[in-house]
Image (spheres, helix red, strand yellow):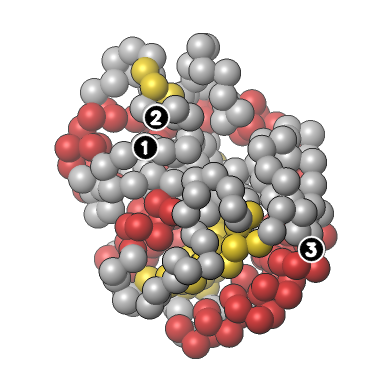
């Protein structure tokens, strides 16, 4: 699986006062290891507005100073450039069957609201591109970030052409995605704190694989967060590199086409190895 990214991710969307776990160093350590990658290009406003309101997109473009967009999410004059580039790399990953290494992440972003480090819904933008430009009718999103993919779910909740599946720690931030939150086209798999490789494998066996296969997607788009790792500072799960390798391998077997987009993962020492394990899994 080829990697799509851009060197600008290490310079854009930086806020000296934010002290956020989501910072340029995440992509810097990944680029040090995965130095051979295709350079993505920014998404257009039209592409992003397939899932976000034009007013919201304009508001992000208009940021001209350091601001807080919510309690966790910062913005500054280059945030729009970074967010459009992240969405564009996700689009390119869908086109080539690649893995987009991007920031800011996207799976918490709502139609008209930034949330949880996320500005634009990168996976959602890429899914719509697959449908509108590549002629793929049925897309399944498999999200194994440790946090519920509430933004992606909300953007597609009433669209029968997109299935959203989220495996996540629960109860946990953002407080959504509990055991009673499922609906047609929405499958949440809440897992208890401390869950590791075996629990994720069982969830895949019992829930994820049957529901995705029944949906018969033409594309599986993986929201690949690595903050369920045992050494990640933001959560309380116990996944290992082997577990992420297996999640990627099994996700790749669920549809004729697969692509992935980076979400969370905040331990800079472990993140490159976890991405490498996932790339191995997608390729096997």
Task: Judge depth for marks 2 and 1 and give the one in front.
Answer: 2
Residue position marked by numbered label 1 in the rendering:
114
Residue 197: which disc? 3
Disc nearer the start of the sequence (3/2): 2
Task: Judge depth for marks 3 and 2 and give the one in front.
Answer: 2
Q: Position of residue 215 (x, y in %)?
A: 45, 83
What residue appears at the point 59 percent right and 76 percent down from the top-left corner? 208
Within-10-Å neighbours for mark 2: few <14, some 14–19, many 20+: few
Disc nearer the start of the sequence (2/1): 2
Q: Are marks 2 and 1 in contact (CB under 8 Å)?
A: yes
Quarter in which the N terminus is drawn? bottom right
Judge from the rendering whether residue 156 lies leftward or rightward of residue 281; answer left or right.
Answer: left
Q: Position of residue 118 (x, y in %)?
A: 44, 39
Under circle 2, the secondary element is loop
Residue position marked by numbered label 2 in the rendering:
70
Spatial separation of the CA atoms under disc 1 and disc 3: 31 Å
Disc nearer the start of the sequence (1/3): 1
Q: Nearer the viewer, residue 146 or 53?
A: 146
Q: Position of residue 232 (x, y in %)?
A: 73, 40
Under circle 3, the secondary element is helix
What residue appears at the point 44 percent right and 66 percent down from the top-left corner? 181
Q: Are marks 3 and 2 in contact (CB under 8 Å)?
A: no
Which quarter of the figure has residue 282? bottom right
Spatial separation of the CA atoms under disc 3 and disc 2: 33 Å
Within-10-Å neighbours for mark 3: few <14, some 14–19, many 20+: many
């Amino acid at each position: 699986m080829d990697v799509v990214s851009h060197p600008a991710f290490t310079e854009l969307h930086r806020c000296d006062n934010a002290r956020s776990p989501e910072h340029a160093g995440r992509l810097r350590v990944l680029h040090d290891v995965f130095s051979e990658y295709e350079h993505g290009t920014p998404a257009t406003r039209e592409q992003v507005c397939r899932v976000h309101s034009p007013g919201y997109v304009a508001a992000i473009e208009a940021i001209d100073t350091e601001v807080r967009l919510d309690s966790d999410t910062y913005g500054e004059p280059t945030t729009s450039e970074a967010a459009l580039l992240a969405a564009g790399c996700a689009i390119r990953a869908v086109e080539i069957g690649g893995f987009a290494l991007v920031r800011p992440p996207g799976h918490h972003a709502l139609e008209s609201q930034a949330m949880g480090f996320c500005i634009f819904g990168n996976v959602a933008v890429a899914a719509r591109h697959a449908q509108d430009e590549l002629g793929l009718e049925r897309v399944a999103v498999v999200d194994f970030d440790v946090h519920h993919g509430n933004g992606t779910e909300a953007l597609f909740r009433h669209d029968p052409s997109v299935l959203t599946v989220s495996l996540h720690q629960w109860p946990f931030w953002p407080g959504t995605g509990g055991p009673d939150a499922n609906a047609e086209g929405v499958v949440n798999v809440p897992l208890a704190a401390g869950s590791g490789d075996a629990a994720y494998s069982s969830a895949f066996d019992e829930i994820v694989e049957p529901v995705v296969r029944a949906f018969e997607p033409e594309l599986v788009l993986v929201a690949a967060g690595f903050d369920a790792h045992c050494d990640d500072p933001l959560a309380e799960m116990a996944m290992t590199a082997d577990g992420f390798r297996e999640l990627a391998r099994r996700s790749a077997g669920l549809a004729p086409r697969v692509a992935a987009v980076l979400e969370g993962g905040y331990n800079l020492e472990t993140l490159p190895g976890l991405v490498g394990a996932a790339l191995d899994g997608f390729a096997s």
